[in-house]
Image (spheres, helix red, strand yellow):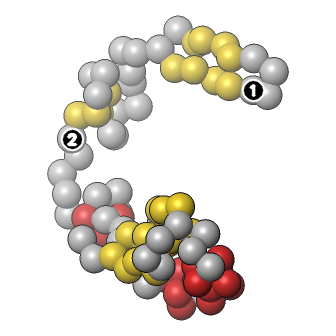
Amino acid sequence: MELLVFGDRGAPVLVFPTSMGRFYQWEDFGLVSHMAPRIEAGWVQLWCVDSIDGESFYNKAAAPRTAPGGTSRTSGTSSTRSCRRSASRTRWIS
């Protein structure tokens, strides 16, 4: 996996590209230059990691596998309970 690191000290911040993006996307979009004063002052260190979207979620050549809990990615049935969250409470659905 390719990555870029900006800064040599400071709080490490792990940053991810957008969907199907690459590790250099933060630099291309100007976010690294926006953070440059904080990086140069040693406040933060940016770790820009690469994406594996093309090898996982968006890989149309991959065969569907069985998901944890006995569900298939294509079947839509589940043997596990799901949870719906709202701002005020959590409700379990059987």
For label 2, the crowd category at 10 Å Cα-Cα, with few meaning under 14, some 14 to 19 and many 20 or more, is: few
Quadrant in the rendering for residue 83 = top right
Relative to 33, residue 68 above or below = above
Question: Relative to 67, is 24 on the left or the right?
Answer: right
Quadrant in the rendering for residue 23 = bottom left
Question: Relative to 19, is 51 on the left or the right?
Answer: left
Direction top: furthest residue: 94
Name which residue lies at 48% across and 62% down. 12
Answer with mark 2 or mark 1, whichever residue precedes in sequence.
2
Name which residue lies at 43% across and 76% down. 8
Q: Label for residue 86?
A: 1
Relative to 76, residue 46 above or below = below
- Could you say where residue 85 lies in the image, as x and y percent from the top left? 68, 25
- Could you say where residue 63 lies in the image, as x and y percent from the top left? 18, 51
Towards the viewer: 50 or 13: 13
Q: Label for residue 45?
A: none
Quarter of the image with the N terminus is bottom left
Towards the viewer: 80 or 26: 26
Mark 2 and mark 1 residues within 8 Å of each other at the beta carbon: no
- Residue 18 visible from this viewpoint: no
Name which residue lies at 67% across and 84% down. 37
Name which residue lies at 35% across and 57% down. 57
- The kind of residue on which mark 2 rests is Arg
Q: Secondary structure at mark 2?
A: loop
- The kind of residue on which mark 1 rests is Ser
Q: Label for residue 65?
A: 2
